[in-house]
Image (cartoon, grey):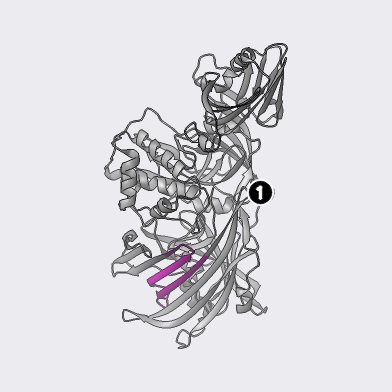
Amino acid sequence: MTQPPVTVRAGTLSLGRRSLGRLSLGLLLLVATAATTRASEETTQPTSRWYEESLDGNKTGFRRVVWAPSTWQGKKTLRDTTTVVSRTQRNMGGVRDTFEVTSTSELERGADGTVWWMRTRVEEPDRVTVDETTWTGAGYKHTTTIVGQEKNRKTVTLEMAEPVMADSEAFLGSRARAGKLAKGDTFDMRQLDLRKRGASVAKLTIAGTEELEDEEGKTITCVKVVERHPDSGSEITLWLDASGAFVQVRIGSFVIRRVTEGKAEAMPSRPAGYSITVPAIPALARIFNADRTLVDVHIRADEHRKLPEFPTSPWSRVLQMKGDAKEGWLAKVELRRYDDQAAKARIPLVDKKFARDLEATALMQTQDPLVRQTVLEVVGDEKDARKAAYKLARFVYTKLANKRSPNVAQADAVQILKLCQGDCSEHCLLFVTLCRAAGIPARRCSGYVCIGSMWGSHAWCEIWTGQWIGADPTTGEVGTGARYIFYGYPDRAGSFPGEVSSRSRGRLRLVFTRVEEGRAAFDLSDPNGHRIADPKGKRFVHALAGVEARDVPADWRVRLSRDNVMMLQGPGFSAEVGAWGDQGENMDTVGRFVRGQKTTFAGVPALLRKSGTNRMYWIFSRRRRIRVLVGGADDQVLAQLERVLAPTFADPAPAWAPDAKETPAKDAAPKDGEPKQEPAKPGR
């Protein structure tokens, strides 16, 4: 679960690992290298402006822009130099990480906004990254370099017939100065889209005029411009003064506003904080093994953000959306297991259709000697794609046992291997890199995930093992349960997880209404159904945790408490059974946390610790950690207790079993007039 600070990357303005919206180069240049007053384009004196940045009303940083006439390869140009400083703190379920980023962007452009050259240097505590984009005469060459690791250079040549525009401010500047922008005017502006590796055409609309305060507190009349991305639908709103320079920019709840130097540099004593997790309602210990779940996603109204459009995918799809922009929305979302254990593929795969999912990047150095050696040691001579991927997933899970975030927005694969630490973004990136190096097509995915007790922003993976399936190295899984809401692919053109994330952040409440595991199906919309107590039938079930007792003796008492605990008491003994989502632990790794002797309980492997007549068992079953505390039981009672609790550990009967008692709820289609969800891209 990740989401560090606002950082600038070529082609993306991101809230760290969660983009505020998929931006073309033009939109990036607007917010990263915004020009200043252009009342006289011929001036020979540099001009400087200051801006402060805020997210949800909390200051995250500032920027200084210096503009001056220049030349580039014999062309008369305008040069913008922008320095951005940001400092934020992420709260991930009580774990707080502070991120500090300084970036410097230099831009050479024509007076009409034509982009000739741009370079952005991003400095983080443990790394410096340089992105450079250059006009070649026939297209653009884009290079990313991790300083000190020249071998990690990544070059992408983008061919197009003519140069693109830097930003809407430069594109509309001369018209603003001439007073030729009227409400309702529209313009098409070509921009460079790096993920698309081509050009996009943004639509600019003049929305009218509004009164704003300038940096000196004076009220001025500004032209309001709305820029819309042609594919994602993301919007930037900017306000231009009479000189054609922007006074304010808004991207959802992220705002850049022109201020004085003193106000810009006055940073708060504490970094702006944001949370990326919300409670799971109710908590579901059995979530990791769920085949299908239904979730009510409540979306709070927000005047500055549109409704998030969750794309359809093998993980999740919206069945129904209702509500309005004033009262908020309710999305009924279906989540499904994403796996195909019968699919087979031999590695390495070299099919051209997988080229994008096997390529190396600046962050994913598949040809690096350390990466290649790691794959050789972990995979060995294994040729089955699924088995090899599982080995790599378990390696990443174990290697990155320290889940603290590094001091960079996104560490590269070599750095992760050396640091041996990282949150889900590092797990995901390293796993994808190792898979690609092994010849397994793999790509990163972004969205929201439930881990039982909470939901949070998350990065996981999709891999090819004869079919595309889900994989999550953060929890050591190949084949994923019904616990993900998919936002998109961060590295794929036509997919916009950042836009979904920026519209969703801080306004979601998620409530499970149904869970299915095998043929067992439970309606969770009624809290009375969370716990099933049937003394006459001698059966007790904790539906949320999958804890079950059958054939309970008449002289035993059973009590179901909280979301995950069953208490049993009989003549001379007592027992407590608790269940939690296993987070990737198993009998091989739990020894790091629990000491005990290997044994069995109810026929499954267990670890046992004894203290007098008290016993504690740890069992890993159906992707849950189950702890059984037993006091006072002799061998005969203990054997009976194991028989009573055996259904807790048994594999669920398949959903197609002929005696299945319940059937899944019928899917509900969106009603007329309600938002329709488009398939995730790229399609399968």
Q: Which amino acid does label 1 sit on?
A: Arg
Total labels: the figure holds 1
In the image, the segment drawn in magenta is: 101-128
> Quick one: SS at disc 1?
loop
Residue 117 included in the magenta stretch of the image: yes
In the orientation shown, which residue stands out farthest toward the front?
612
In the displayed structure, 91 sits above or below 538; it is below
Residue 480, percent from left and from top: 47, 35
521 with respect to 555 (left or right): left
Find disc 1 in the rendering and name its residue. 300
Residue 567, percent from left and from top: 69, 24
103 with respect to 304 (left or right): left
Residue drawn at 63 percent across, 61 percent down = 272
In the displayed structure, 662 sits above or below 620; it is above
In the displayed structure, 532 sits above or below 30; it is above
Evaluate whether residue 163 shows in this view.
no
Residue drawn at 66 percent across, 19 percent down = 540
Residue drawn at 49 percent across, 58 percent down = 409
Residue 601 included in the magenta stretch of the image: no
